[in-house]
Image (tube, grey):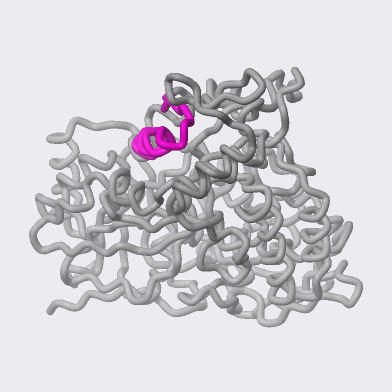
Amino acid sequence: MPKRQPRRFPQAAAVALFTAIAMAPAPGIAAPKASLVLAIGGEPETGFDPLMGWGAYGHPLFQSTLLRRDADLAIQPDLATEWHLSEDRLTWTVTIRDDARFSDGTALTARDVAFTYQQGKTAASGLDLSVLDSASATDDHTVVFRLKRPWITFVENFLTLGILPAASYGPDYGRHPIGSGPYRFVSWSEGEQLIVERNPEYYGKQPQFERLTFLFTGEAAGLAAAQAGAVDMVSVPAVLADNVPAKFRAIAVPTVDNRGLSLPFVPDRGETSAAGARVGSAVTSDKAIRQAINMGLDREVIVDVALHGHGTPAWGPVDGLPWQGAGDSPSFDLAGARRLLDDAGWAEGKDGIREKDGVRAAFPINYPASDSTRQMLAETAAELLRPLGIDATAKGGSWSSIEKVMHSEPVVFGFGSHSPYQLFALYDSSLAGVEYLNPAYYANPRVDALFAQAQAAPSLEESYPLWSAAAAEYGVGGDAAWAWLVNLDHVYFVGECLDLGKTQIEPHGHGWPVTASLADWTWTCP
């Protein structure tokens, strides 16, 4: 998915800024480490408004959610104390705790919850509440959600959508957020820093650190600041992950932040998308090509070369999560992949590149030119496909140029969330060509039917086997609809005295997923 590029500061100026921030005493704070300085990226382009996507890939910080996931990804209460789904799967009834207050001191009630979801239905953002018919408060502590159809992944909104104050929400909210989360907003200098302080109104476990400063000046400058001792934690890409500064340690957090090759599924019949982009490929529409790509890519080599070892092979888009299926777990078999292509009639030409019915096994692998990791993945994958007789070429471009070819040529995409809806977004035929969802136009009626059964399940947990079963259809043993390559490690250089506690398997890298355990962070030095 495309992501906002941070404003770039000259490195020396950035380090000077970081050092000044780190050394400046925080007003009203006596302990020298009651504050932290964090350079972990993730500045939101549209501000800190949950209706515009803030908090979708990590804790919303300023706002509370109805439910939360613990370090083991088990669902726990947050604002909600009880939540029940009706037998017809159309009505959620949620009870709200009675001691929640916004950071401005006003009480948070069920009316604020209903307001947030009603506003979200019409928000012009990536938030999808289209299945919601209505959200209404029956009293101060009870909110009722009525759905248009059974849709078990609606509960995921309870885990990610921060609750807004109905009385004060307005157009400028994203730049001056008020919420009931563990921290309250102090100031934001776009492209530079965000300062937050502990929220005294917060009903939950108070975090140890009174003040946090988030810096937004880029990866290289963040590393330089760590080397200068001016930050307490910095996130680093794989290419920099071995340069651990003195008095820091590297923490590699496992993720489902995956990267994979979309493989256009339908033949090229001259059709176009609603936006006018060409749809279909004469090469990757052949199942044998897709299966051979999956079998013939040595993902261990890709991890070593493209990620410097800071990741794991990806066998699907939800590795390690309860709804992963066995059918999307390929093994490397170069000889088997070559036999598969031979048997399917893809014969090698004089130049070693295969052809079938006048079609050459050749295509570009598109990647955003600004993303060095995806560039390395594209180049490494292209090189590993040559022994198969497939002529793939890494091709960098802007996201606007990729949008014009993403339905007809492979692209290095990145996804990964804590919700089984991720599978629906990638493989359900109803979302073919919708923004960046299902860009390959994949369609399989059996997959659609299993997803429909999963959405109609009586609970999220009871839906897991149905999501898993679909992998036998879309995975390598079936349609081989994508070639998933790697799951990135999220690598953080963390000061030797800062203990992050137990971390989650993190989702896609937008936002601040590492802050999900913020309440458990501690300073271990005197």
Dividing the image into 4 quarters, which one contains the C terminus? bottom left
Above or below, 512 relative to 462: above
Residue 150 visible in image: yes
Magenta-drawn stretch contains 383? yes
Q: Which residue is drawn at 63% across and 67% down?
A: 323
Left or right position of 50 against 143: left
Q: Which of 375 and 249 is in front in this view?
A: 375
Q: Residue at x 75, y 18 (%)?
A: 270
Q: In this view, does 221 lie above or below 318?
A: above
Image spot of residue 139 (x, y percent): 80, 74
Q: Would you say residue 141 sits in the magenta stretch? A: no
Instruction: Say left or right for 33 vs 391.
Output: left
Residue at position x 86%, y 56% in the image: 133
Quadrant for residue 482, please give it.
top right
Dominant secondary structure, magenta: helix
Observer-nearest residue: 190 or 343? 343
Residue bounds of the magenta highlight: 376-396
Residue beneath the point at 14% across and 77% down: 525
Residue 254, position as x, y percentages in the image: 39, 63
